[in-house]
């Protein structure tokens, strides 16, 4: 298959998973760690624009960062935020989580320990993981008003040396599989998957973008 045809399939998954939502002011900015420092930059912009008074960075060592960084994701992100002007006393960090479910679980515990009970939360994540983040939050953190957002970068402009196109496409394929499978495990709320999206998923699996499928890697 020609590269442009693969890109067309991948963009279908990107557009589906990039569940960007309108934002309103909230009680908390909740940043899920990753290997993409632009997620931290997005959170800093939201803080500076007055969307919320507190930022929580959550993340230990994930599958893409455990062999790259010598600090937990939350520390890397929070250090970047402080460097960019977010006051240290407006930041909380959680450094033990290794997947999305633990991001939620451990952050809830951290907030309870600090007597913080937010009613509304802006969650910040990579653009192609927004739908799964939202589905996870809705299932595992009921009773909150959630909005999800990510770096405002288009598919064609997203890729870097660390986040190559092939890697991102593989993650997109894995996340789309998780959108289908994880509700039956109790991890997420169900999400409708249009036929066009699932057909694109199946074609990319046939093309070998299988490195991040549930049956070939540790779920996250």
Image (tube, rainbow, N blue to C red):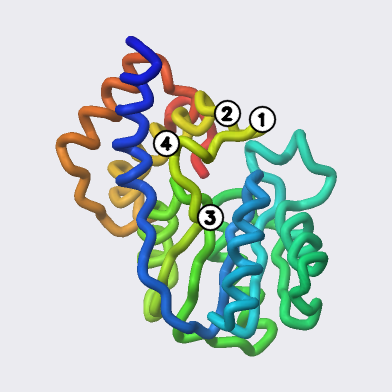
Q: Under tag 2, what secondary structure?
A: loop
Q: Residues within 10 Å of mark 4 (few under 14, many from 20)?
A: many
> Which label was assigned to residue 164?
2
Q: Which residue is mark 1?
A: 161
* Residue placed most toward the observer, 92 or 22: 22
Q: Under tag 3, what secondary structure?
A: loop
Q: Earlier in the sequence, mark 3 or mark 4?
A: 3
Q: With respect to residue 147, does 214 lie above or below?
A: above
> Which label was assigned to residue 151?
3
Q: With respect to residue 19, does 28 lie above or below?
A: below
Q: Which residue is mark 4?
A: 172
The percent position of residue 56, horizontal first and vertical second, equals 65, 71
Q: Earlier in the sequence, mark 1 or mark 4?
A: 1
Q: Given contact means CB atoms under 8 Å apart, are the residues at marks 2 and 1 in contact?
A: yes
In the rendered view of the protein, which quadrant contains the N terminus? Answer: top left
The percent position of residue 127, horizontal first and vertical second, equals 47, 50
The percent position of residue 96, horizontal first and vertical second, equals 70, 57
Q: Given contact means CB atoms under 8 Å apart, are the residues at marks 3 and 4 in contact?
A: no
The percent position of residue 173, horizontal first and vertical second, equals 39, 32
């Amino acid at each position: 298959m020609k590269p442009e045809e693969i890109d067309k399939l991948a963009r279908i998954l990107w557009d589906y998973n990039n569940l960007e939502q309108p934002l309103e002011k909230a009680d908390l900015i909740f940043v899920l760690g990753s290997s993409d420092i632009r997620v931290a930059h997005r959170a800093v912009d939201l803080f500076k624009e007055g969307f919320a008074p507190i930022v929580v960075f959550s993340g230990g060592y994930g599958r893409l960062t455990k062999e790259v960084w010598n600090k937990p994701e939350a520390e890397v992100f929070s250090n970047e935020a402080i460097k960019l002007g977010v006051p240290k006393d407006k930041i909380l960090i959680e450094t033990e989580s290794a997947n999305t479910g633990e991001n939620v679980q451990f952050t809830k515990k951290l907030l309870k320990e600090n007597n913080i009970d937010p009613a509304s939360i802006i969650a910040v994540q990579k653009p192609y993981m927004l739908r799964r983040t939202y589905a996870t939050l809705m299932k595992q953190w009921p009773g909150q008003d959630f909005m999800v957002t990510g770096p405002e970068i288009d598919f064609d402009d997203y890729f870097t040396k660390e986040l190559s196109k092939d890697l991102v496409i593989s993650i997109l394929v894995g996340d789309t599989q998780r959108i289908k499978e994880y509700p039956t495990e109790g991890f997420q709320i169900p999400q409708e998957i249009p036929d066009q999206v699932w057909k694109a998923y199946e074609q990319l699996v046939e093309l070998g973008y299988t490195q991040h499928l549930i049956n070939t890697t540790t779920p996250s």
